[in-house]
């Protein structure tokens, strides 16, 4: 699933090509979710069957919340008010000053704004309505510095910029409009050193560079234009080491390398060119250990290994070559426990396991082979209490569970098998209060909830099942505020709100129900699917009585009905990944007896049945990436014996079987992006020897083979964005010499070749949004000079060219309608608007300046209706509305809704 998010609209495109989006704007905001289809319509005031092309979508209108609607491109009408309740505040982001927690929330009146809480209902209040009215300023990147909260917020006048607050409305102010006007500088990556905030921001003149601020406009300034001009050095991994700022950044001569800064332009310099030349060492996983920076980086001789730096060139060197030679151990999750550095790293013998280091080669040692053999336990989510390290790790028999270590093999043990057997509880969000460990974990009976542990099996217990039953409540970061745990939780009655806990069930309570009510018929999570078979639309909807289940509609209110209550009662079966295979609907759904498994439906209750319980019992097989190949369904599924591998189904239990165990044993190959080219299935899959590479299958085990090992070794080329153009597969892949570029394949190793090195050298042009328009491939790429632009290719190097340079365009949401490519693009004068292209420079033009001025209308596309583009855009008054376009300015108009 690909997610693109902007200030007011979120677009979600599922693997099936269905597009869902939410849009917030205008008086009360709006939210819409949609999918293209043919054969539908509405007939005015009296419900009539679908008789022409239509599109079904979800929309927040008529004061009924988010409900299914239908449009034929001329008008839109409500299919049915499936649920009449309100929604939750959807709280997010936390920061602490003294005894007050700052966070973001939406009360249903003011949009998402900055709030604060002292832990009482009366003391939980909005700080300021920054973007006045129902619009959301969407505060992000909240950090506390010496009693002041810094954050980013969005307004119509300045876009997303740097703000600060002392906790009062009058003291909540814009620090500086860095990118003057309504185009956002988008600050992020905040780090504080001696009261100064360092961050990354973007301007038209300097691109994305390093900035600093002391809280005033005058002291908010560019620290250094590392990649001189409008190109971006894109600093990352900002880390404070005893008052010196370390980070990684990219320039044209050394690539992405290690930098440091003392807060002055002159004192902001490259530390060392670790991977000599323009190649990237790509330093990451920064951690401060006793005043020395430790990190992972790569070069040509040792691969990605464990490094250290004291800020000098001579003092920057690799500590240990854990995976000897040019292969990479790829150290990650570096974590300091009282002067000992713990991390995970891999080699060919043990796989990814737990290591520790005192910063010397002799003191860098393997702790324990938790998952014996070469598969590795993949330890992560490190946290410590005193000298004990807690983390999540997996074994073949117990799955991902909570472990602890004192740095010795014998002292590295599983704390508790929370989710009994080989299934995972996946401990996350680990923190502690007064020597008690708090975390979230998943079980079949309670879902993901709040747990605590004193480090013993008996003392590792569920704190409270907030969302009663198997549904999960706790998914966000846990924060310790003066000995009380704060977090976000989703309950049956209040929705997602701010909670607190003293570690007891009785003391785990909601702080305040900011946005009263919780139910809605179409969830905003993006898990819903719409698909059309014949004249019937199938989709998922949520009601108070049946929960989230499978529905169908013929385009009338009376014909919009529940197909089957798969998980009987108000609990959810949550059907997803709906796909039509020769007139049969396939999807995955959850039950308490089988978990999430494969189902099919003929549109009747009796004909809606489980195809097969692939992962026997209550465990789920985690199906995804559904694809139709010659009338057979192919997909990814998980079992305890084979891991996540390629499966197929003809709709019968016996005909639902594993195609091939690509990564032998319980390890997973994770087949993804399944794409049909001339009745051959192409996909990306990973093995322990080749990494993630391009594979193909004819549906048999023998015919499921590696096409080509593009990047030799275990790192793999990670093929993405697979697209069929006239029988040739195009995709993006990454190599050490060319970076991520455009490739094509005819299914043979010799016929799998680089099309063009668009950004010469090892830099990434990162081709994405590959789209077939009448036999020509269109895509978005960055050649390092003009930024992201629309390109096209006929499969040859000379025929792979940029279509047109549009200043700062960043094209998004490419879609093909009737031989024309449509997309959204941004310019300094018009903002983000609707564009089209016929493949020529002269024919690549803005369709209409819907919202005049630099704000832009932010169009996001739903699909095609009667050879016209259906989309949402923000009008001159700031309201998000439904639009359609025939590709002309006059033919780009609003679709009226009641």
Image: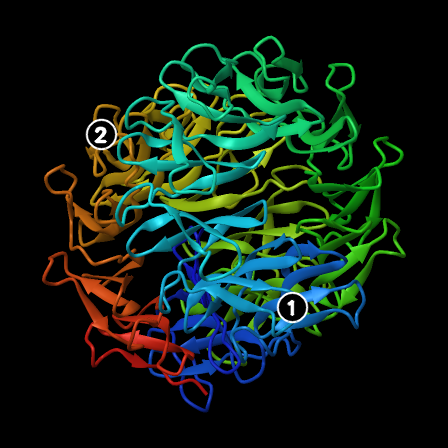
Q: Nearer the viewer, mark 2 or mark 1?
A: 1
Residue at image position (60%, 38%) is 614
Q: Position of residue 58 (x, y in %)?
A: 49, 71
Q: Is residue 168 left or right of residue 492?
A: left
Label 2 sits on a secondary structure element that is strand
Q: Quadrant of residue 752?
A: top left
Which residue is identified by label 1? 89
Label 1 sits on a secondary structure element that is loop
The reply to whether discs 2 and 1 touch (Cβ–Cβ < 8 Å) is no
Q: Position of residue 831 (x, y in %)?
A: 30, 68
Say if 889 sits above or below 814 in the image: below
Residue lying at the far top in this picture: please name it: 362
Residue at image position (56%, 21%) is 345
Q: Is residue 507 left or right of residue 275?
A: right
Q: Quadrant of residue 546?
A: bottom right
Q: Between 327 and 57, which is closer to the camera in this rendering? A: 327
In this picture the colour scheme is rainbow
Q: Between 559 and 329, which is closer to the camera in this rendering? A: 329
Q: Residues within 10 Å of mark 1 (few under 14, many from 20)?
A: many
Residue at image position (28%, 73%) is 866
Q: Position of residue 386 (x, y in %)?
A: 79, 30
Q: Which mark is residue 293?
A: none
Q: Is residue 175 left or right of residue 184?
A: right
Residue lying at the far bottom in this picture: please name it: 45
**CA gap, disc 2 and disc 1:** 50 Å
Q: Position of residue 623 (x, y in %)?
A: 54, 43
Say if 486 sits above or below 252 in the image: below
Q: Residues within 10 Å of mark 2 (few under 14, many from 20)?
A: some
Which residue is identified by label 2? 753
Residue 490 visible to the viewer: no
First of labels 2, 1 by sequence position: 1
Residue at image position (62%, 17%) is 357
């Amino acid at each position: 699933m690909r997610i693109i998010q902007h200030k007011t609209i979120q677009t979600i495109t599922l693997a099936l090509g269905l597009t869902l989006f939410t849009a917030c704007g205008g008086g009360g905001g709006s939210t819409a979710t949609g999918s293209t289809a043919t054969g539908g319509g509405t007939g005015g005031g009296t419900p009539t069957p679908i008789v022409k092309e239509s599109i079904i979508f979800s929309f927040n209108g008529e004061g009924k919340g988010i409900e299914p609607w239908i449009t034929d491109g001329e008008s839109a009408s409500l299919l049915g008010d499936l649920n009449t309740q309100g929604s939750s505040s959807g709280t997010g982001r936390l920061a602490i000053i003294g005894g007050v927690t700052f966070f973001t929330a939406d009360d249903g009146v003011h949009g998402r704004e900055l709030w604060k809480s002292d832990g009482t209902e009366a003391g939980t209040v909005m700080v300021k309505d920054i973007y006045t009215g129902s619009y959301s300023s969407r505060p992000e990147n909240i950090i506390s510095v010496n009693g002041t909260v810094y954050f980013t917020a969005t307004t119509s006048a300045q876009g997303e910029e740097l703000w600060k607050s002392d906790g009062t409305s009058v003291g909540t102010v814009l620090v500086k409009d860095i990118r003057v006007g309504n185009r956002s500088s988008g600050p992020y990556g905040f780090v504080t050193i001696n009261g100064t905030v360092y961050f990354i921001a973007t301007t038209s003149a300097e691109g994305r560079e390093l900035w600093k601020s002391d809280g005033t406009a005058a002291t908010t300034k560019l620290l250094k234009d590392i990649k001189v001009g409008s190109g971006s050095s894109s600093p990352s991994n900002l880390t404070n080491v005893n008052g010196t700022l370390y980070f990684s950044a990219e320039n044209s001569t050394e690539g992405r390398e290690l930098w440091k800064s003392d807060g002055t332009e002159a004192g902001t310099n490259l530390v060392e060119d670790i991977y000599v030349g323009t190649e990237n060492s790509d330093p990451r996983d920064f951690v401060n250990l006793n005043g020395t920076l430790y990190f992972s980086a790569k070069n040509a001789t040792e691969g990605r290994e464990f490094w250290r730096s004291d800020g000098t060139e001579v003092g920057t060197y690799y500590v240990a070559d854990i995976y000897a030679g040019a292969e990479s151990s790829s150290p990650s999750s570096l974590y300091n426990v009282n002067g000992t550095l713990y991390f995970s790293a891999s080699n060919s013998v043990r796989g990814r396991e737990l290591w520790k280091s005192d910063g010397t080669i002799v003191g860098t040692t393997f702790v324990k082979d938790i998952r014996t053999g070469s598969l590795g336990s993949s330890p992560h989510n490190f946290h410590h209490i005193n000298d004990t390290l807690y983390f999540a790790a997996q074994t073949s028999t117990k799955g991902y569970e909570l472990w602890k270590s004192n740095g010795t093999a014998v002292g590295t043990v599983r704390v508790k098998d929370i989710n009994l057997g080989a299934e995972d509880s996946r401990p996350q969000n680990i923190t502690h209060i007064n020597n008690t460990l708090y975390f979230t974990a998943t079980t079949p009976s309670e879902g993901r909830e709040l747990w605590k542990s004193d480090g013993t099996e008996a003392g590792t217990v569920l704190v409270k099942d907030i969302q009663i039953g198997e549904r999960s409540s706790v998914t966000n970061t846990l924060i310790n505020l003066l000995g009380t745990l704060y977090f976000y939780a989703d309950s049956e009655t209040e929705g997602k709100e701010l909670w607190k806990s003293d570690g007891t069930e009785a003391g785990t309570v909601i702080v305040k129900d900011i946005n009263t009510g919780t139910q809605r018929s179409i969830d905003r999570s993006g898990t819903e699917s719409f698909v059309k078979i014949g004249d019937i639309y199938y989709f998922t909807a949520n009601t108070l009585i049946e929960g989230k289940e499978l529905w169908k509609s013929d385009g009338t209110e009376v014909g919009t009905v529940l197909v089957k209550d798969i998980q009987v009662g108000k609990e959810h079966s949550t059907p997803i990944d709906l796909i039509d295979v020769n007139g049969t609907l396939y999807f995955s759904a959850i039950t308490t007896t089988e978990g999430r498994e494969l189902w099919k439906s003929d549109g009747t209750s009796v004909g809606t049945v489980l195809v097969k319980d692939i992962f026997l019992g209550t465990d789920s097989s985690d199906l995804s990436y559904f694809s139709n190949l010659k009338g057979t369904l192919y997909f990814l599924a998980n079992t305890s014996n084979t891991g996540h591998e390629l499966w197929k189904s003809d709709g019968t239990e016996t005909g639902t079987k594993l195609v091939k165990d690509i990564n032998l044993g319980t390890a997973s190959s994770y087949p993804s992006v399944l794409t049909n080219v001339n009745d051959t299935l192409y996909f990306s899959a990973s093995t322990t020897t080749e990494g993630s590479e391009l594979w193909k299958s004819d549906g048999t085990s023998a015919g499921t083979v590696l096409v080509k090992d593009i990047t030799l070794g275990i790192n793999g080329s990670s093929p993405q964005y697979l697209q069929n153009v006239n029988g040739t597969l195009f995709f993006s892949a990454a190599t050490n010499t060319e970076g991520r570029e455009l490739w094509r394949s005819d299914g043979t190793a010799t016929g799998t070749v680089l099309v063009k090195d668009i950004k010469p050298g090892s830099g990434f042009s990162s081709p994405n949004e590959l789209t077939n328009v009448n036999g020509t491939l269109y895509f978005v790429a960055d050649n390092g000079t003009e930024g992201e632009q629309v390109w096209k290719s006929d499969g040859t190097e000379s025929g792979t060219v940029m279509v047109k340079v549009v200043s700062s365009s960043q094209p998004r949401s490419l879609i093909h309608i009737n031989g024309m490519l449509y997309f959204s693009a941004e310019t300094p004068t018009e903002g983000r608007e609707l564009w089209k292209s016929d493949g020529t420079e002269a024919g690549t033009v803005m369709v209409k300046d819907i919202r005049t001025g630099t704000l832009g209308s932010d169009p996001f596309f739903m699909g095609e209706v009667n050879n016209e583009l259906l989309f949402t855009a923000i009008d001159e008054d700031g309201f998000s509305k439904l639009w359609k376009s025939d590709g002309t300015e006059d033919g780009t108009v609003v679709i009226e809704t009641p």
